[in-house]
Amino acid sequence: HLMRRRGSSMSMIKAVQTINSTRFRTEKLEEFYDKHEEIGKGHFASVFRVTERSTNTEYAAKFIKKKRLESSKRGMSKKDIQNEINILAEMDHENIIYLHQVYESREYVILVLELVGGGELFDFISEREWLTEEEASCFVKKILLGVQHLHSKNVVHLDLKPENVLVTESCEVKVTMCPPLRRRRGATRTACR
């Protein structure tokens, strides 16, 4: 009986955290965070290192350019951004980047995400030129555990590559959740059994 109550209170805490992380805050990010250098750039987004003033915790702030018109080719639609946020909010796994907060300005939706200090797996491998079999199998196992969690939530990562896998300073692996992410409908067929 106590375990059921404890499990119930833990799921309530998770629900509150999910609501807080997915709620679009309209205050300026700069009121709560110090913005530092750019640490990444994509087609529709730039990522900056930020520090939350109240906790002195560092995060990655992903500034996603919103489309002005639905027919525009520049930026992401609000619907696609909301889809990414909803998927990120469901992910609670040690090998997947987590979403901390969401801010919205006139031009951008800003996702405040876990900051991973070690960089991309691609750069990690390039700098070392080779990995031992033990290191490689450890990385593959952790990536597959993250992907397994995605699949358990009916989400597929359509751009899984070493550039979208981050390595912490202690060689832990975090799969980044950058678009395109899609909900899987029905069973997925594969030639592998």
Image (cartoon, helix red, strand yellow):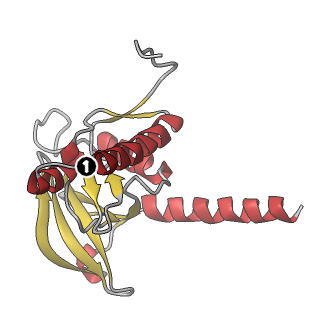
The residue depicted at 31 percent of the width and 40 percent of the height is 80
Circle 1 sits in a helix, a strand or a loop, which is it?
A: loop
| Name of the residue lying farthest toward the top | 191
Q: What residue is at 33 percent from the left and 49 percent from the top? A: 134
The percent position of residue 129, horizontal first and vertical second, equals: 10, 50
Q: Nearer the viewer, residue 108 or 89?
A: 89
Q: Is residue 61 visible?
A: yes
Of residues 184 and 147, the one nearer the viewer is 147
Q: Is residue 176 above or below residue 154?
A: below
The residue identified by callout 1 is 132
Mark 1 closeness class: few <14, some 14–19, many ≥20 residues within 10 Å:
few
| Residue found 12% across the figure and 36% down from its top | 72
* Amino acid type assigned to the residue bearing label 1 in the image: Thr
**Coordinates of residue 31 in the picture (x, y in percent):** 28, 82
Whether residue 66 is visible here, answered yes or no, is no
Direction from residue 9 to residue 184 in the image, left or right: left
Q: Pick the quarter of the image with the N terminus.
A: bottom right
Q: Give percent across and percent down for residue 100.
A: 40, 65
How far across and down, in percent of the image, does residue 57 sit? 34, 80
